[in-house]
Structures are given as structure tokens and as C-alpha cells.
Amino acid sequence: MIAGGGSIGQFHPASSPLHALDPRAKLLAAAMLVVGLFLVDSMAGMALVLAAVAGAAAASRVPPAAFGRLLRPVLFIVALTALFQVLFSREGPLLFGWGPLEVHQGGVRMGVFLALRIALLVSSAALVTATTSPVALADALEDLLSPLRRLRFPVHEMAMMMTIALRFIPTLDEEAQKIMRAQAARGADFSEGGAAGRLRAVLPVLVPLVVGAFRRADELAEAMESRGYRGGEGRTRYRELRFGPRDGAALAVVVIVLGGAVAL
């Protein structure tokens, strides 16, 4: 995958401190951030995490426009979450009232808080995938899950499946856009009617999209078999992962930021 469009799962090659980190360190940092965000319960703590993620995004040298496109698919979820909190929460003083509609200070605060949490969760995942190649991501997942081999867990196969699924998110998104443009050129309208009408208009897109996904999966399986892929047994790597001092320093920074955010 190369830079171009923009969706979660797309790798943007660049020369940056984040690209140079061991992929295992990035996965561990993202996991700690995900867990830590659910422990942060103040706006000051969330602001600290936001500043840290913004600094990491700047250090990644991923173009701001491309990073914005990475977050675009979840903007609707973020906005809907914030709207529900603002409209249906009755905590705190009343700020605005119009008939049955009431907006309370606590609802606004909780709406902004949850919107920030979702945006930061998605941003951390987007930073990992944007600065880590799919091959390195698969190797890192396999290494981190390797202790499960003692339980006869198919570690290599699971890591490969997760990486391939992540790899095809941009591909399926591009395929869906092509199908929608083709149907729009034939008279389909995806903007008429309410939510139910738009849902019915989108349903015809799913059939060719699912068929195309199965076709790509068959082609990928045949390509892997023709190249001698037989799972993880006896498989070697062109580049071995090495955990260095800078990776430990990066994890230490994440721990310090999360500790400070929770303390706030």
C-alpha cells in the first residue's frame, strides 16, 4: 500500500521517528493508550493525551490532509455520540431549553469528552497503521502473540488473517466508492429520502462489494499457494525485529503521559 487515498489500514511511507520504531513497540503503545483512555476521567487529562497524540502525528510526517482522511470514516460516529449525550443527558445546569429539548452543561461536557475519546482511539490505531508496513505489522503481531503457541493457538495464521483484513480496508473502501459512482451514473440517488431511504439505496452496493471481496480473497489465496506459502512452519524473515533503547524510551513516554492524564 502506498500513500494516496486515506483510510485506516493504509501505510504512508516516510522517514520519521515513528516509522523507525519497532512495530512491537508501536502496537504496545497503542494498546496502552486504548486501555489508559478508559481510565482518564477529566478534560485536563484528555487534553494532555490529545496534545501527545497530536505531537506524535506531527512527528510521523504523515501529511495532515491524509491523516484527516484517515479519521473521516468515524466522524459520523463521533458526531452522533456527542449529539446523543448533548440531547439526552440531564446532568448539570440547564443551558438551553425549547419545549422537550433541553441542553445541560453536563451533557455538553460528556459529549465532548466521549467524542475526544473515540477520536483519540481511532487516531492511535491510524498512527500505527500509517507508520508500519503490513509485513512488519504481521511480524509484530506474531511475536507478541507467540506465548500462545504453548496452548496450540495458531499464532501465525491469526496474525496473517488480522493483517490481511487490515490491508484490505482501503481496497474495499475504494471498491465501494467505484460501485457507488457507477450506480450514480446509471441514475441511482444515495441522498434522497430519510435514513431508511438512504439505507435501501446503499443495499444494492453491498452485493457487488461482497462478491468482489470473495473474488479478491480467492485470488489472494491462489497467489499465496502458487508462491509456496504453507503457514508459519519453517518460515524465515528477511528482516528480524530488534527492540532498541529508543523503543523503550517511546514506551516510557507513553506511560508517563498516561500516568499524568490519569492523575489529572
Image (cartoon, rainbow, N blue to C red):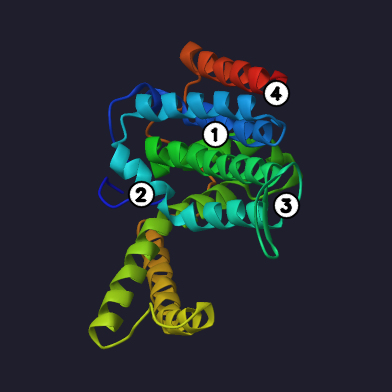
In the structure shown, which secondary structural element does the residue marked by tag 2 occupy?
helix
Q: Circles 3 and 1: CB distance less than 8 Å?
A: no
Horizontal side, residue 129 vs residue 179: left or right: right
Quadrant housing the C terminus: top right
| Front: mark 1 or 2 | 2
Q: In which quarter of the image is residue 116?
A: top right
- Give the mark nearer the N terminus: 4 vs 2: 2
In the structure shown, which secondary structural element does the residue marked by tag 1 occupy?
helix
Residue 62 appears anywhere in the view: yes
| Front: mark 2 or 3 | 3
What's the residue type where badge 1 is placed? Leu
What's the residue type where badge 2 is placed? Arg
Whole-percent x, y for residue 171 in the image: 35, 61
- Give the mark nearer the N terminus: 1 vs 2: 1
Picture disc at residue 89: 3
Residue 10 appears anywhere in the view: no
- Give the mark nearer the N terminus: 2 vs 3: 2
Horizontal side, residue 196 vs residue 102: left or right: left
Q: Distance between the residues labelled 1 and 4?
A: 21 Å
Q: Which residue in the protein does label 4 denote?
A: 262
Q: Which residue in the protein does label 1 denote?
A: 27
Horizontal side, residue 132 vs residue 47: left or right: left
In this view, the residue in front, 260 or 195, is 195
- Give the mark nearer the N terminus: 1 vs 4: 1
Work out which residue is located at the far front of the displayed protein and give it: 98
Q: How far apart are marks 3 and 1 (CA)?
A: 35 Å
Q: In which quarter of the image is residue 92?
A: top right
Whole-percent x, y for residue 157 in the image: 56, 52
